[in-house]
Amino acid sequence: MLLLLLLLLLLLLLLLLLLLVLLLGARTMMRILRRLTGKQPHPEPEPEGPPQDACGLRARSRSRSPVGPSSGRGVPDFESPPPTRRRSSIGDRPLGARQPLSSGVAAFGAQQPQAPGIPSRRCSLGRPSVGGGAQPSRRSQALSRRSFPHRDFENPEAETCWLSCLFQSLWHSVVFHTAFEEHLAGSKCIPGPEERILAALQQTWAAYKREEAAEGQQQPLLSAADSAADAERPAPSPGGEGPEARLVPACELAEAFGRGYGDMSEALALIQDELSQSSSPAAVKIAELMVLVPVSAMSGSLPVPELAWQQALDWQVSASPLIAVDLSSEPAPTGPSCELLARLWVPSFAQEMPSFSAQASSIETEGLGRGHRMVALVCFMWNVQHYVAFCCRQSDPKRCVFFNDLPALTAGAPKDLMWSEVPELCGRFLLTPRLMLYESLAAAKEVGHESAA
């Protein structure tokens, strides 16, 4: 009788065990059995690393407060490669140790040695017009265009202001814009595996144009005059509504330049260096269009345009289509000093300064030397470590567009203003002129004629 009861209890336990298996599942029962036998179950795999944002970048602490929308475009992880070591600014080096980025201007289209194993396209910047000259070439049309569209960049991590300002400066240059659009944009030039900066420029260039096209599709048909005026309207401020408020992402530029960089002149030098080593002949020739002229303040004086022009003459690069002037100034400027320095460099103010009276004939009020006009003025805010840019309008050289991807730092600043209003704005927000970009349209046309021949 006792044996029968034990058998019934055992059968009942087996039935309960079977019921538990059905209810909890085989995986849960395996964990219970392992715990009963003293064995620990294998831990569940967990996702590695912190969550990523829409750009594919790992979440990081924000050094500055304003946060913008993410772009939704994926790029490789920032944390995968080792951090890039920050280089010292070219503008901070001794004047005697500096060298120009390029020693002169060469004609486009010259044959360059090809890197083995890297596909490239043969490009010539002297492309003849279709129809045997019956119509103006695309290059001449681009050089004579009256305006470029204006877009704002996003800066969710408050770390890419220097890259967005550099891109805005190059985008609004007729010389660089025309050369890049015709010979490096899109599939016209395929970057090599090591040309990360060129690839990032191409992707950002396409995104800039894509936002422009998206905005244009939402607008009704306008007359030719209205269309020209509408193209010169400033981009809407970030945070607005509708397609006009879309911002251009800076993810690709940030990933290509690497962590640790943050200097405008150094970024320009990196672009020139990579293009000069490209397997594309057009990229090499575009690199030769650019020179960087550093100017340091003498003791008790401010850096002035005469010093930059004399440096360009000494280096024999005064005929370069693109001249970037890198200023070295005091690290803790005041409002009056920022305004005074801006008045020295902003177009139309040079002749009003007493120090310019002796050489007024050699320095044009619109730019640097004879024939070079200002394209962009990039300023640095020392108190918050932030870059902003003023870019000249093509349709009205007396006016400029103010670009700041963290607009809360300059609340109340106008988007569109006269160049004559820039110095006062610099004094109000402690904007110290840091880099000026000048271009010569005559030199660009001359290069195009040489390549066509």
Image: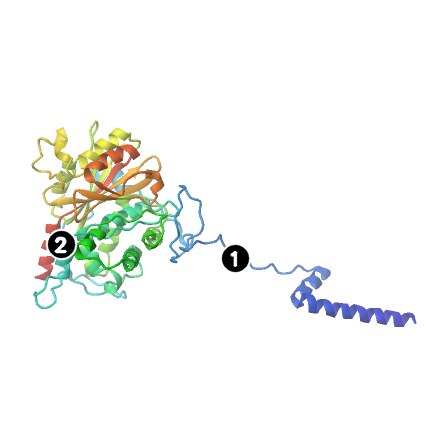
> Residue, x 9% and y 64% (percent of image)?
135
Q: Is residue 325 left or right of residue 241?
A: left
Please give the name of the residue rendered at 33% of the width and 40% of the height, measured from the top-left corner: 386
Decide which of tag 1 and tag 2 comes sooner along the chain.
1
- Give SS at disc 2: loop
Return the mark for residue 155.
none
Say whether residue 329 is visible: no
| Horizontal relation, residue 30 to residue 370: left or right | right
Q: Quadrant of residue 327?
A: top left
Place residue 285 in its image quadrant.
Answer: bottom left
What whole-number distance in Å separates the C-alpha atoms at marks 1 and 2?
55 Å
The percent position of residue 261, horizontal first and vertical second, equals 33, 46
- The residue beneath circle 1 is 47
Quadrant in which residue 358 is drawn: top left
Amino acid type assigned to the residue bearing label 2 in the image: Ser
Mark 1 or 2: in front is 2
Density class for disc 1 (Cα within 10 Å; few <14, some 14-19, many ≥20) is few
* Amino acid type of the residue tagged 1 in the rendering: Pro
Helix, strand or loop for disc 1 = loop
Quickly name the residue at label 2.
Answer: 144
> In front: 161, or 414?
414
Q: Position of residue 374 (x, y in %)?
A: 17, 44
Q: Is residue 430 above or below residue 317?
A: above
Check the picture and name the quadrant holding the N terminus: bottom right
